[in-house]
Amino acid sequence: MGPGARLAALLAVLALGTGDPERAAARGDTFSALTSVARALGPERRLLGLLRTALCHTDTDSVDGAVTETLFYDKVLSLHEDSTTPVANPLLAFTLIKRLQSDWRNVVHSLEASENIRALKDGYEKVEQDLPAFEDLEGAARALMRLQDVYMLNVKGLARGVFQRVTGSAITDLYSPKRLFSLTGDDCFQVGKVAYDMGDYYHAIPWLEEAVSLFRGSYGEWKTEDEASLEDALDHLAFAYFQAGNVSCALSLSREFLLYSPDNKRMARNVLKYERLLAESPNQVVAEAVIQRPNIPHLQTRDTYEGLCQTLGSQPTLYQIPSLYCSYETNSNAYLLLQPIRKEVIHLEPYIALYRDFVSDSEAQKIREFAEPWLQRSVVASGEKQLQVEYRISKSAWLKDTVDPMLVTLNHRIAALTGLDVRPPYAEYLQVVNYGIGGHYEPHFDHATSPSSPLYRMKSGNRVATFMIYLSSVEAGGATAFIYANLSVPVVKNAALFWWNLHRSGEGDSDTLHAGCPVLVGDKWVANKWIHEYGQEFRRPCSSSPED
C-alpha cells in the first residue's frame, strides 16, 4: 500500500468513514452541530403549516376552543417570522430541539378528538423519524449546563434570556440579544430533570428552582405542549434537596406538593420521613447544604481553562510585549509577493501566529458547503478506538484536494506561508468542523502522545504543526485557549492560527495544550490542516536541543 493509500485509509478511520452523506446526520446527533440544528427548522415549518390548517377546520366549541394549541402555534410562528432569533442562540436551539422532541407530539395527541387533524397526524408521523431524539434533548440540556459553568452564568437570568456572569455582587453582560427569549417552566424543568437523572444535583437544583418559580406564577394555565407541571417540579426538587442533604427544604417543598395533590401517599410518607429526620437532628433545620460541582477527573486544568474562556479572547496586555509584532508576510515566496498576508505573532513559546484574512468570504463559504453533507460526530482517539465523548461536541468532515480546485489553491497558500510540504502523505486532508450547541473541545494536544496512536499508521511521523482556519464568526465564546501559555485567541473570521506542536528535537511541546472554549452564541466553523514531520526535514531542520 502506497503512502497516499495509507493516508486515505487512516483518515477514513479517523472520520468514522466517509460513506453515504445521508448517514452523516445520525439521529441523536442533531445537537452536536449547529448546521444540523438549523436543518431541523424545515420540518417544524411543515408542521406549522399543517397545524394552521387543522386549527382553521377545528370546531372551537368541541375541542375546548383549541385555545392552547392556537397559543402554541402563534408562539412558534413568531419565532420563525423573526429573523433576529436564529438557532445560534443556545436557548432558541434548546427549545427548538425540545419542541420537536416532545412538544409537537403532545400537541398532535391533544387534537385527536378533532376530525380534521388527519393531515397533521399523517404529516407528523412522516417526519417523526427525522426529528431530534431524546439524546438530542439531553445533549442540548447538558450544553446549557456547560455554558452555565464555564461562563458562570446565572440560571435565573438565562431563563429570562439574559446572558450574565454573576460573581459576588458583580454582574457582567456577556451577550445582549436583540430580542429577549424567555424559557418556560417546562423548559427549565427539562434541563433540571436531565441533571437530576444523572444524579447531578448541583445543576438540577437551580434549574428545578426556576421551574417551580415559573410554574407557580402560571399555575392553572394549562399548556398542551408541556410535559411537566408544578407538582412534577416540586417532586423532583424536593428529592434533589434531600439527596443534597437539605432535609428542611425537602420537607417544605413536599408539604407544598401535598397542597396541590393531597392524596399522594408516596409524598405523604416522604413528609413523615423528613419530619422524623429533623426531629432526630434539630440542627438540620438551619443547616445550609453546600453542593459541590461534579468533578471532572480527566480535566486537571479546569480552573485555568475556564478562566481563559471567560476572557472571551480579550488579551489587551499582550500588545504591551515588545517581542510580539505584526507584519505583512511573504515568507520570501513569489506566491505571496503580490498579496502578502497580515501576520500577528501573538506568542513566542510556544510560537503562535495569527494570519488575518487568510481566506475570503466566498472561500470560507465554499469550504462549509463542501463539508456540510459529510459531517459526522467528531471523535477522539482512545487507544485503538475512536470514541464520541462529552468533552468534544462537534461534527467534522475530511475534504480531499480533488473536491474542488479551490482546495488545491488553499494548500498552495498554506505551503507558501509556512514553508512546509502539505501534500499527502506529509499532511492530512483538510478537516472541517462545525460546533454544536455550547460546542467545545476541552484541553488536548493535536500531536500524538502515545506510540500506539493511530496517527503513526500514516508512516509520516507525528503532527509537527497545526494550521487552523476560522471559517465563520461568533457572537460570543468559542475562543481557542492555550492553557500553559495562559492565552486565549478569539474567533476571527477568515483568519488562520498557526503553531508548532513539536520541538525541533521531535519531542511534543507540552505548552501547546489547548482547547476550543464552548460557543456561547454563534455558529462556529473551523478547518484544520495538520502537517506531519516527514517531508519537512530540510524545511524545518531537526535540533538536539530540547529548547528549540
Image (tube, rainbow, N blue to C red):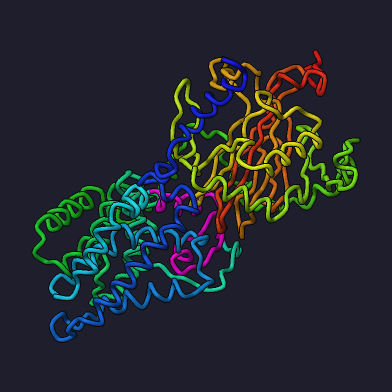
Q: Residue at x 43, y 70 (%)?
A: 182
Quadrant including the N terminus: top right
Give the number of callouts. Answer: 0
Q: Quadrant of the C terminus?
A: top right
Instruction: Point out the residue furthest to the bottom here.
Output: 61
Residue 156 covered by magenta stretch:
yes
Residue 107 horizontal/vertical position (percent): 24, 68
Q: Tell me: residue 36, above or below residue 429.
A: below
Residue 463 is situated, as x and y percent measured from the top left of the image, at 66, 25
In this picture, residue 473 sits left or right of residue 162: right
Q: Please indicate whether residue 197 sits to the left or right of residue 162 in the image.
A: left
Q: Give percent across and percent down for residue 221.
A: 25, 77
In front here: 406 or 97? 406
Query: Is 168 or 356 nearer to us in this picture?
Result: 356
User: Above or below — where is 4 with respect to 199?
Assistant: above
The boundaries of the magenta stretch are: 139-168
* Residue 229 drawn at (x, y percent): 24, 66
User: What's the residue at 49%, 47% (across, down)?
Assistant: 373
Is residue 49 something one can see in this rendering? yes
Q: Quadrant of residue 305?
A: top right
Q: In the rendered view, would you say 46 is above or below 528?
A: below
Residue 227 appearing in the image: no
Residue at left 66%, top 48%? 470
Residue at figure coordinates x 29%, y 79% from the top left: 70
| Residue 391 to residue 504: above or below | below
> Is residue 98 one of those drawn in magenta?
no
Q: Give the camera-side residue of 271 and 431.
A: 431
